[in-house]
Image (tube, rainbow, N blue to C red):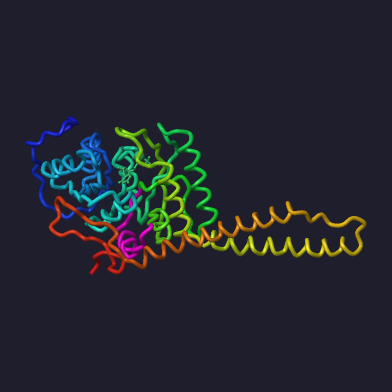
Amino acid sequence: MNNNNIEPEIKLEIKEEKPVLSIIAPVHNEEAGLAQLYQRVKQVLDGIGEPWELVLVNDGSRDRSEEVIAKLHRQDPRVKGLSLSRNFGFQVAVTAGLNHVLGQAVILIDADLQDPPEVIVQMVEKWREGYDVVYGVRASREGETWFKKATASLFYRLIRQITSVNIPVDTGDFRLMDRRVVDAIRQMPERHRFLRGMVSWVGFKQVGVTYSRQPRFAGQSKFTLAKMVRFAMDAVTGFSYFPLQLASWLGFGIAALSGLSIIGVVFLRLFGKTRPLLGQATTLVSVLFLGGIQLICLGIVGEYLGRIYDEVKGRPLYLVKQAWGYEKVDNATANSTSGKE
Ligand code: UDP
Ligand code: MG
């Protein structure tokens, strides 16, 4: 079957086997690329020769992605589908996949074919050598704007500076994880998820393979600037107290400065020839300056507080509306360890 057209009448005869390799692809309005994704994944994984499954998680698509997933499942039962009740975002969609896969090694891949499935062969080789996490390092990014590349590069470096976990630079979510890493991630019920950080936090033996990131096969990027800013905030707040400590450092700094100024002012008042300049403007500027700093610090505390509130509410992380290839679905809640026995 090397043609790229999907014929709904053809149903492949696949013998039922427990998959060793599981591929998870989150799908948000990707109808145009899914058939191609299936073909490429199938070709690569049939080449590897282990039983596999491809789990497509529909993250509230408004196009016909759901129909395409259903059709692919009817045609090849190794394709499984989960449809979330609305758009929950990339990180949560992947989590839904992680909670359902059966394989011994799990590979996350974008549905838009920006991460070439052919790299999976190298990842599996490394896994067989004994690595628990094999992440894809982007040697180059094709077909992306300079703005995206610049902000991405800045983001990776900033995160590295201020977080306590060692997150490799220029890696996305394209990666292979061993079953024990997946089980560890499933015990981390946090709401505002930053999977790359979580995977680094888990530890075990990790290694990178380089690849060149391709242009999108079809459609366009779903990540707006606002979404990227949210994502960066989740990454920072999830893995660092640095912004909270910033308030103390600023406080110490400003207190020290004003201490020195007081001494200076008193000195000038007593011994200076001219009187210290203390007009209205000086007072106004310093009051506004301090007010600004206080509001920023309050905002930072608010960011953490809001996230704590979300955790405390303990709502399900996502809701599954429909599933293909599953009899039972798992709507992960904060205080269950995601369906683990
Ligand atoms: N995606 C998703 N939910 C979203 C946004 C994106 O599941 O809310 C999926 C999307 O379908 C794709 C992957 O996440 O498979 C990466 O998204 P995209 O290509 O838009 O991101 P980029 O490659 O530009 O970082
Ligand atoms: Mg993409």
In the rendered picture of this protein, how many numbered marks are placed on residues?
0
Q: Specify whether residue 140 is painted magenta.
A: no
Q: Specify whether residue 180 is painted magenta.
A: yes
The residue closer to the viewer here, 282 or 125, is 282
> In the rendered view, would you say 130 is above or below 308?
above
The residue closer to the viewer here, 298 or 183, is 298
Q: Position of residue 59 (x, y in %)?
A: 26, 48
Is 266 positioned to the left or the right of 166 in the image?
right
Q: Position of residue 326 (x, y in %)?
A: 15, 55
> In the rendered view, would you say 119 is above or below 292?
above
Region of the chain picked out in magenta, as a range: 175-192
Is 259 positioned to the left or the right of 67 in the image?
right
Q: Tell me which residue sits at (15%, 50%) in the image.
A: 324
Q: Position of residue 70 (x, y in %)?
A: 14, 44
Q: Tell me which residue sits at (23%, 57%) in the image.
A: 319
> In the rendered view, would you say 33 is above or below 16?
above
Q: Residue furthest front?
A: 280
The residue closer to the viewer here, 80 or 44, is 80
Quadrant of ligand 1: it is top left
Point out the image quarter for the C terminus.
bottom left
Rendering quarter of residue 184:
bottom left
Q: Tell me which residue sits at (34%, 52%) in the image.
A: 91
Q: Position of residue 255 (x, y in %)?
A: 70, 64
The residue closer to the viewer here, 131 or 70, is 70
Q: Residue furthest left?
A: 9
